[in-house]
Image (cartoon, helix red, strand yellow):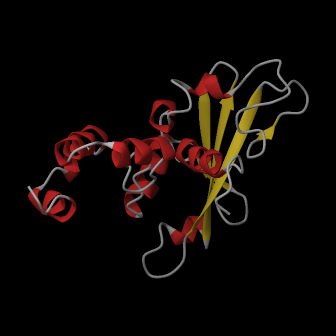
Amino acid sequence: LNQNKRGKSAVLTAITVCLGGKASVTNRGSNMKAFIKSGKSKFFFSNLFQINKKNKSYAVIRVSIRNRGEDSFRHDLYGDSILVERRIDHSGVSTYKLKSKTGAVVSKTRDELLSILDHYNIQVENPMTILSQDIAREFLNATSAQDKYKVFFFFFPPVLKISSVLTFFFPFL
């Protein structure tokens, strides 16, 4: 399971991208079009994306979110699962489709996706939620407690910069 070159980082990157994360956050490209190589038979996410077979000009990533129980999000519209679909074309332009369990399109807006993510407290660009291999390596390789502190403040959003979180991670400060 932890062997190299098995696609673990690619899966995390695909989840981040599908749920609205910026390409730069993944450390795999500076923009979305970096993931789509027009005219190539191999795409960065070729094992995760469904690719348009006719002209290979776009890719689609899908992530399913469980939507059950008392705290479900708009269960009357989505049902027991929410399918998030992000389509990215060769120029880097992307669109969203938010589908119900039955496959019916409920919304095509990023705002609705952000509402879903907020409802479930999913912060795709927060390293506490999805910790990439590169960020973990940088944090662990920081030479001193002060360096770790600097890396922490660089990668973590301002909302987490509170004394209780710092005390938890850095009890020596």
Quarter of the image that includes the N terminus: bottom right
Residue at screen point 77% across, 39% down: 46
Quarter of the image that includes the C terminus: bottom left
In the image, 66 versus 26, the foreground residue is: 26
- Spot occupied by residue 39 in the image (x, y as percentages of width and height): 83, 18
Side of 97 relative to 111 (left or right): right
97 over 81 or under it: above or below: above
In the image, 3 versus 107, the foreground residue is: 3
Side of 121 relative to 166 (left or right): right
- Spot occupied by residue 138 in the image (x, y as percentages of width and height): 38, 41
Side of 129 relative to 164 (left or right): right
Side of 10 relative to 154 (left or right): right
- Spot occupied by residue 97 in the image (x, y as percentages of width and height): 63, 46
165 over 57 or under it: above or below: below
121 over 151 or under it: above or below: below
**Which residue is the extreme one toward the front?**
143
Total of numbered circles in the picture?
0
**Which residue is the extreme one toward the bottom?**
70
